[in-house]
Amino acid sequence: MSQVPHVRLNNGVSIPQIGFGVFQIPPERTADAVRVALDAGYRHIDTAQGYGNEEGVGQAVRESGLRRGDVFVTTKLANDRHGYKEAIVALDESLERLGFDHVDLYLIHWPRPRADRYVETWRAFEKVAAAGKARAIGVSNFQIPHLRRLAAASETVPAVNQIELHPYLVQAELRDYHRTHGIATEAWSPLAKGGDLLQEPVIVALAEKYGKTPAQVVLRWHLQLGNIAIPKSVTPERVRENIDLFDFELDNDDVSAIEEMGRFLRTGPDPDLFG
Ligand SMILES: NC(=O)c1ccc[n+]([C@@H]2O[C@H](COP(=O)([O-])OP(=O)(O)OC[C@H]3O[C@@H](n4cnc5c(N)ncnc54)[C@H](OP(=O)(O)O)[C@@H]3O)[C@@H](O)[C@H]2O)c1
């Protein structure tokens, strides 16, 4: 039995707090990678139209022997599919590739503020949710002004905002906004892509203190902040390591010490400019 806690979204849908991200996993390797993750106990997979690997995700879930309702699957609207009709058709195409009749979460991948179409796109998201093609709808890479604009134009509050978030980019303001408005915070690149962060003295010292690995300390920090986190790995031992987080708890001081590492360092693009 998986011990992963669930977060209840603002429409009552429940999402496992640890998921498996598949960005940059080549299409031909995706089904195997997802199989490893499902075997390790993950019940939440994060893909996107832009990753080109939805087929592999769908295949692994369908062949797993698990019930569809036991695996939470997210996909995201590709940047070049903004617009009312486009966003609806794009989800139908995703469902075809996944081999599902619905996704659990459909996200606007990037706001693309210069194109200025995300409000229109959000109307399409409300439509697919009402039609049962997405159990929950949300956004990704939205900054506070983008969230405010949606709130002014629509009564539907995004269930989730999936943002770059790790100890180098702690996103305190956005997390506050989310908390106040009932939006769940989902962390992408939760390990800051597994680079320097995992060698930071603060993280390494905590790993020694708790007898866990640096990645486990960082993921445990996400859990204790209430974030949903979706680490990616194609290395089976790491896939298992990244969900083996439930036999220790960070002291409050240690959670704060990690928070203090924040230095506004992005590993990915600036959402105000991207796309
Ligand atoms: N919404 C968005 O715009 C957006 C953007 C980026 C990512 N995402 C989502 O977030 C997911 C995760 O982000 P990410 O892949 O960029 O970064 P990440 O999960 O922070 O890091 C992945 C990297 O860390 C390595 N790694 C994983 N576990 C490790 C461990 N226990 N010890 C040491 N190294 C480890 C992986 O290597 P190996 O694979 O070689 O093991 C890989 O190179 C993506 O897959 C995607 O689903 C969303």
Image (tube, rainbow, N blue to C red):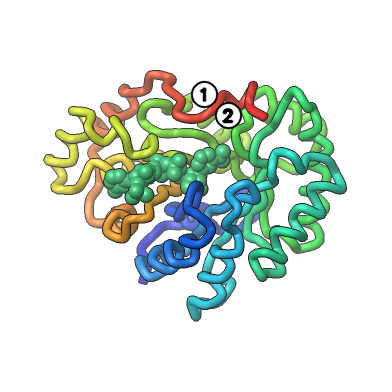
According to the image, label 2 marks what residue? 177
Q: Quadrant of the C terminus?
A: top right
Name the residue carrying label 1.
173
Horizontal side of 223 relative to 11 (left or right) equals left
Callout 2–callout 1 Cβ contact below 8 Å: yes
Of residues 86 and 28, the one nearer the viewer is 28
Q: Residues within 10 Å of mark 2 (few under 14, many from 20)?
A: some
Which percent across, then down, holds residue 113? 72, 25
Expressed as whole percent of the image width and height from the top left, the position of residue 7 reads: 50, 52
Residue at image position (74%, 32%) is: 151
In which quadrant will I find the N terminus? bottom left
| Residue 99 versus residue 26 in the image, above or below | below
Q: Is residue 91 left or right of residue 230?
A: right
Rendered residue at 43%/20% (across/down) = 264
Q: From the top left corner, tell me how far across and down residue 183 is, in percent.
A: 60, 40
x 81%, y 52%: residue: 88
